[in-house]
Structure formats: structure tokens, C-alpha cells
Amino acid sequence: MGEAITRREFVKQTVVGSAALAGGSSGAFALASPPPEDLGHTVVSALGTLFVPSAPGDPGYKELEQFGITDYVLKNFLASGHAPDHGGVETAGDGNLLEEFNNAAKQFFGGKSFLELDEQQREQYLELIHDGSKIADPKLRSQLQTFYRAARTRILTVYYQNYPEHEVKRNAKGEPILKPGDLHQITNPNTKKTVTGWDLAGFRGPMDWEEEEQRRAMMKKILPHWYEGDLVKLTHAKPAAPASQTSNGHDYYDVVVLGGGTAGCIVAGRLAERGINPKTGDRLRVAMIEGGDDWTIRDPGIRPGYGYPIRRRMITNINYEELGPEGDEPGPAYRWPYAGENFRIVGGCSLHWGGNIFFPTEDDFRFYREASGVDWDLARFGDAFREIEELYHTTVAPVETWAKGDHLWADAGRALGFEMLPWRSAHRNCLDTRFCGEGHLCKYDSKGTVLPWAYLGLNNGLKIIPHAEVEKVLIEKVPGGRPVATGAVYKDTSGTLHEVRAARVIVAAGTVGTPVLLYRSGYGPQEFLGDKLLVENKNVGLHLDGDASAGPQAYFPEPVSADGQGFTGHPYTTMKPRPYGELNVQLWPRNKMDYPHMVALGPFAPGFGWKHKEFMRTGIRRIMFKFVNRLQALPWKWRVTPDARIERLSLDEQRIDATLREAAELSFAWYDKMAVKPLTIDRRIRRATSLRPGHNTGTARAGANREVSVCTSDFDCHDIDHLLITSGASLPSTLFCHGMGPIAVGAAYAWRRMIANHFSRGSSTKGFA
């Protein structure tokens, strides 16, 4: 039985990966020489009409030829045979695959090439290739099946990504171009001019203004409270204080925060608002350096349920755009060249996350203490919890927003003896659209983010330096004393280096970015840094922890997914009761409509032709039901390398595989208890070796001492004075609580400890101007 794949891997192999199907002219699957243009165009055009057939009154691929669909398909057609139902990469050989595919039909159809076959014979040829049993030559079989997978993936991806209305047109600055007279920043490229893949699948795409107004009216009746007005407004009541100058001409701030993501915005905003220079008693001069853009904070405020023009325009809610900010792989301007989750923009992953939130429980704090000896507990974090709950507006989704599949799942779980628990989400005035989680940003300002803290900082003199990639932390060795962090070096978009000095340096660069930056600064293990080592700590980059998800999808005889469901709230439970410990498993239904091209290439989709087309008319709401099994506190060890890779050090394969099987068997029994039975269940079970950690933590973790950690329970670096660390990197481990909740709560606790220890009267004045 083949291994199942995660949605993220599936997206990489089909959506983003479809570009890799042709990529360039080199690589294992590149064509040795391009086929004649007319042959390539003719073959691909013929394949397109097989994969998406047409009939009078029922247009398909052929009707889009007038818009150049085959030319577009051919732009990225052949370089790899890696397809979503294929677990490995095969060698395509040195031959011309297009020509090989065309001519190989002769040995099965009386000397006729593919282009000489009639429609029925062409279908038989594709079925013969897919089956493979009648192709005796293993090399030829591999080549033809590689070609088939590549062609199917590319053609169906292009068609069901809504070609020719598949992308939002952008200007030279990367801003979406709005239609003349558009007052509401509507960026849905789909029109009524022609029938596209979205139309065939019944997928409407992002809402227009009329739909928005209808959703607002509906949700005002459903939600227990509707928040009117702005959550925060930009006043610039205290303009940013200019940097002072050091004796050698460098900019100086009291504190510089490196990273403008989740933790960076929370800490920088609160320090600007409440911190003071302990030497002068003046308010702090705070700078936050962010590698990405700052269009997220250029609007005059945050108005939940409506949004403001700049964010509404920039957020298209199309997650496969090559240049846009959304999706598992956002455009190149929005991502760091790191493994794991990251998002390069002011606000960071708080803009990109799914909106479901878990706060650390006593079990989590027990796990933290056992992992590294931190002194954290629920009582110490009480004020931090309340702060995040208020500004994120954590709530339980109204049952009216549940899809049919949620109710079916919950009823089956109760019948099996499981308690249904309320899933909390971070939404205020949610319009319950289909474009919330899974890499989407919220153009309606409804999802909880850290932008309110950024606005709070701007209103209190915070200086934000965007488009600035930090090269290193400046660490000075003091003869006879401890090393001291004195500032940072960053690079602007022109490549010019800038040196900024500060009394305190706070690294908030995320779980992968933090150790990478510390390595570049000369801080970390001798093993990695060699003669570039300034200060040694073996724990930098080590102890990376995270969870992993698996679980079977099912195909139902009737629609079970919601046409909407922006709330990520739904029922959930756990495989074992509390207290939670190692190999805890959360269970819940993932029950949202997905993009048509994902469904077209999914495990239940027929290969091609009319069966596939009929499947696509209703499949988008019948199959996007996934039983999610999220494994937590796994017995494995990972670390981050200097080149930003995540490297596995150990894995208890036997125990993890046993848990995966147990969770899968429970899922199958759960499906069997549902009042509406699935027609088909994808029964592939993932293996431990295929899992990679998500919601990562721990790579510069807080702890009792430098033997087990990088910073103290108060976020001060064990080894370097005036260096502080907060982000997912400083969390000791991952248990029940994962992702945005612990990172945000950790940062809300961090700024309180930082003010108490560094930025209040009576704190040390060392380093302050």
C-alpha cells in the first residue's frame, strides 16, 4: 500500500510542483531536444480534449484553444514525471518523450501513431499506459507512464486553475490592477465571458461586493456579537523618534527587534508603548527590522468584517498565484529560503495561519518544564493569555457555521464514546468564507493577527524598517568578561549593508530563521561554525520539535462540505484522555471546499475523460472531507543546519508507525459509524519516515541553563549579554498546544519579562545611551 501524503506535500507536487514539471531545459526529465513545435502542440491539444472533453452545450478544453490554452500548457510541460499519485521520481530517458509517446502507439494499434487514432482508440491508449501491464519493455513503460503523469498533471492543473482567467493582473510594483471604477478592491479574475474550470466545478472564487454584503447580513444574525468600527486606528500620536548617532556614525536605538512576524510585532509594539530607557527615564526608541514588505500596516486602521483598501487589494484569496502572498508556497517576495513555515512580511505567519488557536494547558507547561527546566506555569502566563484572547478575539464557532460533514463526524464520534470538544478560533466579525485557513490571508480583517500590536507600536514611536534582511547580530568579545550583543547588520533591497547599534537586541526570527541568524553571527555549535565560532552553545539549532498530520480522505455520495466555512472552528477530540503525553493524537474533520485543480488530481478522481468531467461537477463538495489525525509529542529529534535545512537526527519508527496505524484504523471505524457512508475511503496509511515536523519550536529554547537551552525563562541569552530571544524558537517543545497560540502567548509573556528586567526604572543602564 502506498504512503499517503499531506495536503502541503500534495500542493507542492501538483500546484507549485506543476511548474517543476517543465522547469527548464536541464534535469533528469528534461527533453534532450525539443520536439517539432507542430507535433508538440498537436499532441498536447489532442490530450487536452481527452482529459476535459467537450460536447454541444458542454464546453471543455477545446473551447479554450482560442485563448491559447495549449501554448500555455506547453510553457511548463515536461521536466519531471513526479505526480501526486506517484511516490518517487523516474528517469525519463534521453529520448523525445512527446515523439516517443506518439509513436509507441504503433505497436498496439496496427502501426498507427497516437495522432492517427480515433477518439476511442486514444482513450484506450491512455488506459493501456496507465495500467502498464501490456507494455513489456520496462524502460518504455517508465517513459510512457512518466509522460502520462506529467501531461495529466499539467493539463488538468491549467484547466482547473481557471485558464484563461487564472491570475490577477499586476502592475510593476506587484499590486493587483483593479477594474475601472472598482471601489471595493474585488480581485476575482473569473468572469462570465467563457466557461472555465471553475465554472465547470461550481467554484465561485473570491466574493464580489454583493456577496460580501449578503454574508455580512447573514453573519450579523448568527454571531453572538458584531463589533462595529475599527479595532485599532493609526494615529501616529507619538511619531517615531529618529535614531541617534554613535560616535562612529551608526544609527542607535535603545532596542532593536530582529524580525517583524508574530513575536516581533507583539514585543516591539508593547515595548514602544510601555518601555522606558532606564538611564534617562524617556520612552524607548524601538526599531523593528523586517525582511519583507510593510503594506500590511499602511491602511489607516483595522476594521473587522470589512477590511481596508490596501490589504483588500493586495489579498486576492487565490492561493496558487505565482507572485501573490497566499498559499503553502507564496510568491518569492513573501518567503524566506528556509525549510518549514515562514512568511516574509510585517505580521508574519499570523496573517497566513488557519485561524484555529490552542493555548498552552497545564499539560503543555509540564512538558515544557520536563524538556528544559523552565519555571513557566499557567499562573505566570495569566496576563499573557488574557491579552491574546482579547486582541485575537478567541471564540468558538457557532454551530450554524458547521458543515453537514461536521455534524456527521461529531455524531459518529459520540456513538463511539468520544467527547466532542469545542474548537476555538481567532475571528472577529468573520464572514465565514472559504478563504480563511490553508495559507490564505483575510482581506476582511476578521482573522486574528498581530497587526494590532504593530499599529500600537506605530502610535507610540516604533520605527519599522521593512525590506531589510538581517545579516548578523553584532557580538563583541569583552576581555575578561562575557560577550555582549551591541546591534545588528542588515542589507537593504539594493544590497547595501547598514549597521545599527542598540542597548538590547531581541531576535524574533522564527524557529528556523533564529538559529540561522545566530549561526551567521558566530553563535552556535563548534561542529557547524568551525573557525567562525565566537560563542559556543550546542543547543542553538537543536531540539527542533513539532507535530505531524495524517488521516484518510473520503468520497461521499452527496455533498458534505460547506460552501464557505471561514471559521476553522469545528468539533475535535483526542484519541486518549488527559493527561496528554507523548504521541498524543488530536482528531477532527477537515471539511472545507478546496480549489478545483486539487480535486481534479486527488485520490478519488478518475483518470480522464467524461468520467473525470462528471466527477468534477460535484466532487468538489463530496470529497473534500479529511479525517485529520494530528500526532503530537513525537519521539524524534531534529535540528536546523546553517543552510536552513531541517535535519532529522533520530526517529522511533516502530512506535510512530504503530500510532499511525491505530489512528488510521480508528478513522476507518469512525467513517463506518457515520449516518451517510462514504462511497470510497483512501485507506493508505502514512509511514513515520514520511513525516516532517510542523508548527515547529525549540531551536533556541528557554530553559534552566546553557547545558540544555539557549536562553533563560526570562528570554535572556545564557551566553551573550543584552541578547534576548522570543519566537517559536524559544518554546521548549510542542505538545497539545501548537502553532500560533503558544507563540503569541509566549511573546506576550516575553515583553512583560523584558520590561521588568531591562526597560523599567531600576533596570541595568549598561549599554544605554
Image (spheres, rainbow, N blue to C red):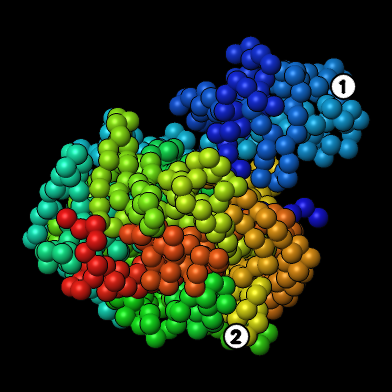
Image-based side of 281 in relation to 732, left or right: left
Image coordinates for residue 720, horizontal then vertical, percent: 40, 58
Hey, what amino acid is under mark 1?
A: Gln
Number of marks in the rendered image: 2
Instruction: Please tell me which residue lies in front, 523 or 491.
Output: 523
Residue 356 vs 316, above or below: the answer is below
- Would residue 327 be visible to someone looking at this image? no
Q: Mark 2, residues whose alpha carbon is within 10 Å: few (<14), some, or many (≥20)?
A: few
Q: Which mark is residue 579?
A: 2
Hey, what amino acid is under mark 2?
A: Pro
Which quadrant does the N terminus fall into? bottom right
Q: CA separation, marks 2 and 1?
A: 65 Å
Residue 112 vs 416, above or below: the answer is above
Instruction: Please tell me which residue lies in front, 174 or 484.
Output: 484
Q: Which mark is residue 331?
A: none
The residue at the point 45 percent across, 82 percent down is 377
Element type at mark 2: loop
* Quadrant in the rendering for residue 539: bottom right
The residue at the point 89 percent across, 34 percent down is 134
Image coordinates for residue 383, horizontal then vertical, percent: 31, 80
Image-based side of 534 in relation to 723, left or right: right
Element type at mark 1: helix
Instruction: Please tell me which residue lies in front, 427 or 699.
Output: 699
